[in-house]
Image (tube, rainbow, N blue to C red):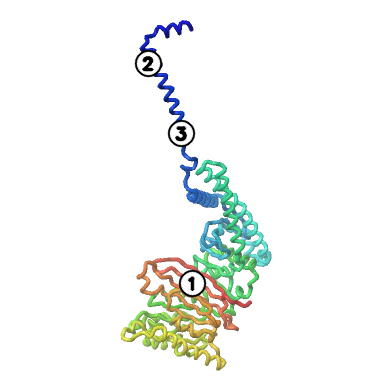
């Protein structure tokens, strides 16, 4: 210590003064800094707004839940003789889709909600299926077996789906947020979302949806899957039985390798093929002939616009009608001329309806009236809706006269829907066209109005729009005794350049067991 003091005393006065001044400046700067306020950012200043965080969390929950269902959310289960895979998929409309590869798919409006049940028929057990086909008496126990299998598979699917959505949302949440609490929150929200979807599906469950399926794929196999119209209409409380019938027929379809089983209609059912607005499409005749053969059609009804300009040069287009294999009932449309009508009236097996005249054809009584307007004729001014309603009044009067004479009409046929509406209350069913799209309506006084689409895919107009119009027709099933409509199949084929086929079955809204 003595040496240090001695060294300090030995330093020159100027150097000692500089050191003292430096130390003083340092102390002053330290005091100044300590007096200045320290600026710190607020803890939430760098965080995104609340709505952005909510949207981000929702995206993580939905994406994670969807990935979870996609990867692990499926169940392999046995339904009767079939091995199936059940899966839940996001959907805007809900329902159930049954994939019967390679025959096509079956769509059932079983429920409404943001999830759809997909059932893939993977394979058929050869031993079980052969036993079912060879021993039909075993079908009596198939109803309970199928119901139990479906319930068991649905329960397993619900449990696995819960695990899948929680695992998917939690894993994705952990990868995005890197916080366990946030990840667990995403998993909990995914589970809540799935539970809400399940509750919605349960609340909107429609067991009768199996009675009105919609088909896509092979047209000839579709009607055979659900049996005949009479059996469907008279059995409303047999959801389990219809489900068993579906499984049985799918089994038979798989069992047959060379040909598909033909549709076997009820012998007591009258079948009417309704076509309209062919508009000179030559492909329509082959389609109509195929439908007549497949469905064993008793009567064909054409509600007009078979032609495009109504000239005599177009009459040769009508020659295939003679070879369709069923009586052809026809009314004049606004593109069909009187020349067209006279040509058809001379053809064998063609029944032209006009002026309210009634004829009994194929076991049903029809009456109709031709369209009062011929629009290709530019020399005349179209009468518009007033002319159509006047024609409809004339038809309604004729229908009343037929009923008073004890020969009531079963089906009225007219081309324009505005004319058809005038028959409300005078006839059970009125068939029409003109609009080029399907439409069914129960009028206030009880008449059912059915508007057929274009069986010609709108003819030459198919190339005018961006997308071609589909080729549409309908098979109508009538009770042979009461002559009342039981059900109808709507048939839709892809338009020009497309190769799709769809059949959907419908029952009247007011149906009597």
In which quadrant is the C terminus drawn?
Answer: bottom right
x and y, in percent, of residue 266 in the image: 59, 76
Tag 3 residue: 38
Tag 1 residue: 491
Question: Callout 1: 10 Å neighbours few (<14), some, many (20+)?
Answer: many
Dot 2 lies on which element? helix
Eye-nearest disc, 1 or 2: 2
Q: Is residue 327 left or right of residue 152?
A: left
Q: Is residue 461 above or below residue 378?
A: above
Q: Can residue 70 be seen from the camera position used here?
A: no
x and y, in percent, of residue 126 in the image: 60, 58
| Depth check, front residue: 476 or 114 | 114
Query: Which residue is located at x 35 percent, y 70 percent?
Result: 464
Which of the two labelled residues, at mark 3 and mark 2, occupies the earlier sequence position? 2
Quadrant of the image occupied by residue 509: bottom right
Question: Callout 3: 10 Å neighbours few (<14), some, many (20+)?
Answer: few
Q: Which mark is residue 406?
A: none
Query: Which residue is located at x 43 percent, y 75 percent?
Result: 436
Q: Which mark is residue 18?
A: 2
Q: Can residue 309 be seen from the camera position used here?
A: yes
């Amino acid at each position: 210590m003595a040496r240090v003091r001695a060294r300090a005393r030995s330093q020159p006065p100027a150097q000692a003064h500089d050191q003292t001044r430096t130390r003083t400046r340092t102390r002053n700067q330290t005091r100044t800094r300590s007096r200045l306020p320290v600026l710190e950012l607020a803890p939430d200043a760098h965080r995104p707004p609340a709505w952005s965080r909510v949207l981000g969390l929702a995206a993580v929950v939905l994406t994670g839940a969807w990935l979870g269902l996609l990867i692990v959310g499926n169940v392999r289960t046995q339904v009767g003789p079939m091995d199936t895979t059940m899966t839940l998929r996001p959907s805007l409309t809900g329902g159930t889709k049954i994939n019967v590869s390679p025959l096509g798919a079956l769509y059932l409006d079983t429920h409404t909600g943001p999830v759809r049940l997909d059932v893939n028929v993977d394979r058929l057990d050869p031993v079980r299926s052969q036993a079912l086909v060879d021993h039909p008496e075993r079908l009596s126990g198939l109803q309970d077996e199928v119901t139990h299998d479906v319930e068991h598979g649905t329960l397993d699917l619900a449990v696995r789906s819960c695990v899948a959505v929680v695992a998917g949302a939690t894993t994705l949440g952990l990868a995005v947020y890197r916080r366990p609490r946030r990840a667990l929150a995403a998993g909990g929200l995914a589970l809540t979302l799935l539970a809400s979807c399940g509750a919605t599906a349960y609340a909107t469950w429609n067991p009768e949806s199996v009675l009105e399926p919609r088909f896509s794929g092979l047209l000839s196999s579709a009607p055979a899957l659900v049996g005949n119209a009479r059996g469907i209409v008279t059995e409303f409380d047999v959801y389990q039985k219809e489900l068993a019938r579906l499984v049985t027929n799918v089994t038979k379809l798989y069992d047959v390798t060379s040909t598909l089983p033909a549709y076997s209609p009820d012998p007591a059912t009258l079948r009417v093929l309704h076509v309209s607005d062919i508009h000179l499409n030559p492909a329509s005749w082959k389609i109509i002939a195929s439908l007549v053969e497949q469905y064993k059609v008793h009567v064909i009804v054409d509600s007009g616009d078979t032609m495009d300009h109504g000239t005599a040069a177009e009459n040769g287009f009508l020659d295939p009608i003679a070879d369709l294999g069923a009586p052809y009932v026809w009314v004049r449309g606004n593109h069909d001329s009187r020349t067209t009508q006279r040509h058809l009236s001379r053809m064998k097996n063609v029944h032209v309806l006009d002026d309210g005249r009634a004829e009994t054809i194929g076991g049903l009584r029809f009456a109709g009236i031709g369209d009062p307007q011929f629009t290709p004729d530019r020399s005349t001014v179209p009468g518009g809706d007033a002319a159509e309603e006047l024609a409809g009044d004339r038809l309604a009067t004729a229908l009343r006269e037929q009923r008073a004479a004890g020969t009531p009409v079963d089906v009225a046929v007219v081309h324009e829907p505005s004319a058809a509406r005038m028959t409300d209350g005078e006839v059970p069913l009125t068939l029409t066209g003109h609009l080029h799209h399907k439409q069914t309506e129960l009028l206030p006084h009880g008449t059912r109005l059915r508007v057929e689409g274009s069986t010609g895919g709108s003819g030459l107009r198919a190339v005018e729009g961006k997308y071609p119009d589909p080729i549409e027709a309908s098979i109508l099933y009538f009770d042979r005794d009461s002559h009342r409509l039981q059900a109808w199949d709507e048939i839709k084929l892809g338009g020009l350049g497309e190769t799709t086929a769809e059949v959907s079955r419908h029952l009247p809204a007011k149906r009597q067991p």
